Image (cartoon, grey):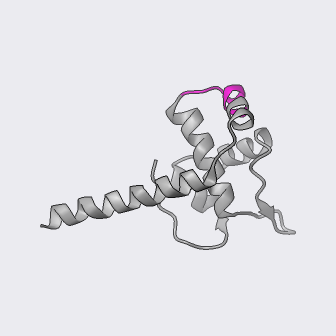
Amino acid sequence: MHIDLPEKRYYSIGEVAKAFQVKPSLLRFWEKEFEQIQPKKKQSGTRKYTQENVKTIQYIHHLVKEKGMTLEGAKKQLTLNPFDTKKESILSKLERIKDSLEKLKINL
C-alpha cells in the first residue's frame, strides 16, 4: 500500500489516519497493542507521529488489514521478523517511481 504523506518531521494522528483510511481510534488502539508504535506526545496529549512510526503502522496495517492476520499473529510477526525499515523505504521509493512512470506513460 502506497501512503501519500508529505515529507516532514511529524504527522498528526488525523493525517496518519487519513493516509491509511482508518479512524484515529484504531491508531490509538494499535498504539496500546503494539509497543513498536510510540508517538511523541505533547503536554496537552496531542500525538505526533514520526516517519518511523508511520512505517511501522504501514507494516502493521499490511499484516492486519491486507494479509488478514490477527493482532496476536501480527505481534508475533513483528517480534520474530522485525520490520526492516531500509527494505520498506526502498520498496516505497520504487512504488513512487512506478507511479511516476505510469503517469508518464499515460501522458505520452
The answer to whether residue 18 shows anywhere in this view is: no
Q: Quadrant of the C terminus?
A: bottom left
The total number of labels drawn is 0
Q: Specify start and end residues of the magenta stretch as a single range.
A: 68-75
Q: Position of residue 42 (x, y in %)?
A: 82, 68
As drawn, 58 above or below 62: below
Residue at 54 percent across and 57 percent down: it is 89
Residue 27 location, x and y as percent? Answer: 67, 47
> Residue 92's x, y, as percent?
48, 56
Q: Residue furthest right?
A: 43
Horizontal arrangement in the rendering, residue 33 relative to residue 84 (left or right): right
> Residue lying furthest bottom in this view?
8
* Front-lying residue, 47 or 9: 9
Q: Residue at x 72, y 29 (%)?
A: 76
**Is residue 13 something one can see in this rendering?**
yes
Residue at 79% in and 63% down: 40
Q: In the rendered image of this protein, does residue 12 appear above or below residue 92?
A: below
Determine whether, in the image, residue 16 is placed left or right of residue 42: left
| Image: 75 above or below 50 | above
Determine which quarter of the picture holds residue 32.
Answer: top right
Q: Nearer the viewer, residue 67 or 33?
A: 67
Question: On the image, which quarter does residue 11 sit in?
Answer: bottom right
Query: Does the magenta-highlighted stretch encompass residue 17?
Result: no
Look at the magenta stretch and give its main secondary structure. helix
Vertical placement of 81 versus 12: above or below? above
**x, y percentage for residue 96?**
40, 61
Which residue lies at the image location 72% right of the left edge and 27% below the top edge? 72
